[in-house]
Structures are given as C-alpha cells and as structure tokens.
Amino acid sequence: MTAQIIDGNAVAARIREEVRQGVEALKRDYGIVPGLATVLVGENPASQTYVRMKQKACQELGMVSFGYHLPGDASQIEVEALVRELSANPEVHGILVQLPLPRHLDEEGVLGAVALEKDVDGFHPVNIGRLAMKGREPAFVPCTPNGVIALLDSVGVQIEGANAVVLGRSNIVGLPTALLLIGRNATVTVCHSRTRDLPGVTRQADILVAAVGRPQMVRGDWVKPGAVVIDVGVNRVEDPTTKSGYRLVGDVAFDEVKEVAAAITPVPGGVGPMTIAMLMKNTLIAAQRRAKAQAAAPGGL
Ligand code: NDP
C-alpha cells in the first residue's frame, strides 16, 4: 500500500484564502485592519526566521504586523512590560511571543501577561486550562495542534472512537494536540522519553502524531497498516548534496512509513504551513470579536 500524501500546502492555502476574504470583509464592514504583534527576544536564528514568515503572511493577507525585537539579555520586567503595553494597544488584535524565550526568562510569567482576548497562540495558562476541561472552550486553540486536526479533517479521518497516539508531551505541540483529540472523542495515549516499548504503543494507533524532534525516529514497522500519520517534527540533517549543506526531515521515516500508512504528511509541506495559516486565522478571529464588541458598545463604532 502507498499512502495518500496529505498536502499541507494546499489545505493551508485554502485557509489563508478564507482569512484574506475575512480581512477584506472586516475592513469593508467595520474599517478595522487586523493587527498582529510579534515579540522576539534574542538572536535565535530559527526564531527570527519564524517571526519573519509570520510577518510576511500578515502582509500577504492584508493584516498589519508590529514587530518587536528585544535583546537577548532583556529582563523579565522589560519583556512583561512590552507584552502588557501591547495587550492595552487597541490596534493590536493578536500577540505572538516567539518561543523558546532565553532561559533566564520565566515563560509562564510572559505568556500570562498576554491579554486573553489577544492570545492568538493559545498558550496563555488560562487558555490551556480551558482546553483541558470538559465543556470549556479556550479563547484560541494553539496553532500547530489546530493544524494537525485540520489536516486529519481534510482527509476525512474518523477521529471519534479512534485509537490516537501522540508522541511528545510538550506544552506547545504534544499536550494540546492530545487534548484536542480527546475533545474529538478519540482514545488517546501520550508517549514521551520515559515510555516503554514505544513501537509496541505506536503500533496500536489508528492516528499517530509524531512531535518529538528526533529525525526519522518512527520506522515503518512502528506503524499499523492503514494508520493515518501526522509528522510535526522539523529536523535539520546534514546533506552535502544540497546548497545549504542540510535538509529538513520529520520525526517519521517517510519512505518506509508511506508504504504502511493509509495517509501521511510530508516534511516539509505538511504541518509546517498549517501553523502559520492557523495563526492568521486566530488573528482574524480576534479582530472580528473586537469589531463586534465595539459595534455593540454604546455609541457603536
Ligand atoms: P520538545 O523538545 O519541547 O518536546 C519533545 C517531546 O518529545 C517531549 O515530550 C519529549 O519527552 C519527547 N521525546 C523526546 N525524545 C524522545 C524519545 N526518544 N522517545 C520518546 N519521546 C521523546 O519539542 P516540541 O514539542 O516543541 O517540538 C517537537 C517537534 O515538532 C520538533 O521537531 C519541532 O521542530 C517541531 N515543531 C514543528 C512545528 C511546525 O509548525 N511544524 C511547530 C512546533 C514544533 P519528555 O517530555 O519526556 O522530555
């Protein structure tokens, strides 16, 4: 069997087009342009690239981006003060604090300073708490996990009742993905570095999500025939045949697993484009909510 390749670029392009139309409508109906503030601390090259990609996406979709770049030795007080200022700025509808922050900073304190209604990354402790609780809705769903679910939906996977295995339990990918799958009535197993017999666990999965950051760790014989495999991992491996000297691979041995799975995401071109598309969607939602609240307030817009 050769798996269906789930085309993240195509799904993301559809979402981006919907967002672009939503931005136009918001401008037309309310005179509001969605604004996303990005907060980058330090000189991590990967973080700089991610922030640039997010700012570029804003421009392409007709949104405004406000870029803030603090030095790597910025203090907790300085970073939180900036985030609070942005939380109070009416032109900013979404705030994105690029993670990871330098080690001397307390991530929870910084993320906790983001106004809930601007938490377009969905990482505010209250939003994660709501995501974890039955019958509660977070203001925003974290972008990469939301992208994982959208990719599953794009190929019509039956999530309800499925055995889902999530490899990785990080705050930004593994854990929220597991919570979303639980919310969609899958039976979910979360694996991590202390899990025993990983291949034995992953072979039980109808839906397998890999988010560990280990190049091509998931082999063909780790996967149940007919499973759907979503590869979140982005890893650089040396490759002298490329101009840059490296190439990107996922956490899944794609060539092996595609012979076993029913559907699989490639890297690149799978989950990656979904993350930014979902961030843009969340920023539009934040601006739409603000527009409606302003219109409903005494005196209207
Ligand atoms: P983290 O390093 O924060 O978390 C990795 C998780 O994998 C941890 O829970 C860790 O376990 C677990 N793990 C690590 N090694 C093993 C192992 N050998 N066996 C079993 N479990 C293991 O990574 P992130 O969640 O931030 O990211 C995961 C991957 O996803 C990375 O490649 C990252 O680049 C990529 N990513 C991609 C995005 C996209 O848009 N496509 C967005 C964000 C991330 P433990 O908790 O025990 O330490």
Image (cartoon, rainbow, N blue to C red):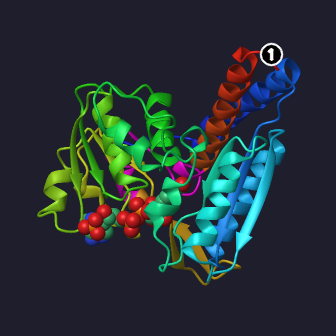
Name the kind of residue labelled 1 in the image. Gly
Q: Quadrant of the N terminus?
A: top left
Which quadrant of the view contains residue 186? top left
Q: Is residue 113 magenta?
A: no
**Residue receiving disc 1:** 299
Q: Quadrant of the C terminus?
A: top right
Q: Is residue 298 visible?
A: yes
Q: Residue at x 29, y 34 (%)?
A: 133
Q: Residue at x 30, y 40 (%)?
A: 227
**Where residue 245 appears, x then y in whole percent?**
63, 82
Q: Residue at x 50, y 34 (%)?
A: 139
Magenta-colored span: 255-272
Q: Secondary structure at mark 1?
A: loop
Judge left or right: residue 163 versus residue 173: left
Judge left or right: residue 224 versus residue 242: left
Above or below: residue 257 compared with residue 102: above
Q: How many marks?
A: 1
**Where residue 51 appears, x then y in whole percent?**
69, 61
Which quadrant of the view contains residue 254? bottom left
Which quadrant of the view contains residue 278? top right
From the image, give the main secondary structure of the stretch colored magenta. Answer: loop
Above or below: residue 4 compared with residue 165: above
- Indicate the quadrant of ligand 1 in the picture: bottom left
Q: Choose between 179 and 35: the one closer to the eye.
A: 35
Q: Is residue 258 magenta?
A: yes
